[in-house]
Amino acid sequence: MKQYGGVFEAIVTHGELNPKMGKMSFEIRGEGTLPTLQIAKPDEFEPDGTPVLRFRKTRIGKDHYMQVILKNEGPISATARFDAITNEAFCFEGSSMNHTIMSKANHAFDFKFTPRKAGLEKFFLTFQT
């Protein structure tokens, strides 16, 4: 549990020019918890701290699979929503790029690499909680 607070302010468009009459403002406070997910795998990182999946050399047209494992150490469930993959050599394997992970659990997401041409392939995989 953590305490949160903020100020809510509503301004009426084309409303009263007097600041006391043309807007409403009040403070909001409360207690709660936010969903959090951590990356358990991959456990290799770029120098800037970004996790990295390094697929091995793979023949053109052949498949190689790797996993991203997310863990939820928080007290509430959290949903991971992966953004679309923008490189045709990589594919998300599974029924949905969204998954809810229960508290104190983890979930593996499978990714497939199928090179279409010789060379280095890269893409950034992002998700939101």
Image (tube, rainbow, N blue to C red):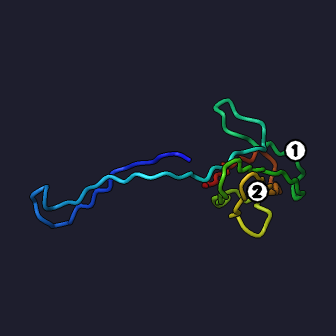
Looking at numbered disc 2 in the image, what kind of residue is underneath it?
Phe
- From the viewer's perspective, is residue 35 above or below residue 120? below
Instruction: Give the labeled residue for mark 2.
Output: 90
Residue 23 at x, y percent in the picture: 20, 60
Residue 47 at x, y percent in the picture: 68, 29
Dividing the picture into quarters, in which one does residue 112 lie?
bottom right
Q: Residue furthest bottom?
A: 95
Q: Is residue 50 visible?
A: yes
Give the distance between the C-alpha atoms of the residues marked 2 and 1, in whole angstroms: 14 Å
Tell me the tag on residue 23: none
Dividing the picture into quarters, in which one does residue 129 lie?
bottom right
Crowding at dot 2, Cα within 10 Å, few <14 / some 14-19 / many 20+, comes out as many
Looking at numbered disc 1 in the image, what kind of residue is underneath it?
Lys
Residue 97 at x, y percent in the picture: 70, 64
- Tag count: 2
Q: Residue at x 28, y 57 (%)?
A: 9
In this rendering, position of residue 101 left or right of residue 58? left
Instruction: Give the labeled residue for mark 1.
Output: 57
| Circle nearer the N terminus (2, 1) | 1
Residue 30 at x, y percent in the picture: 44, 52
Q: Residue at x 83, y 57 (%)?
A: 114
- In-front residue for pair 66/73: 73
In this rendering, position of residue 51 left or right of residue 93? left
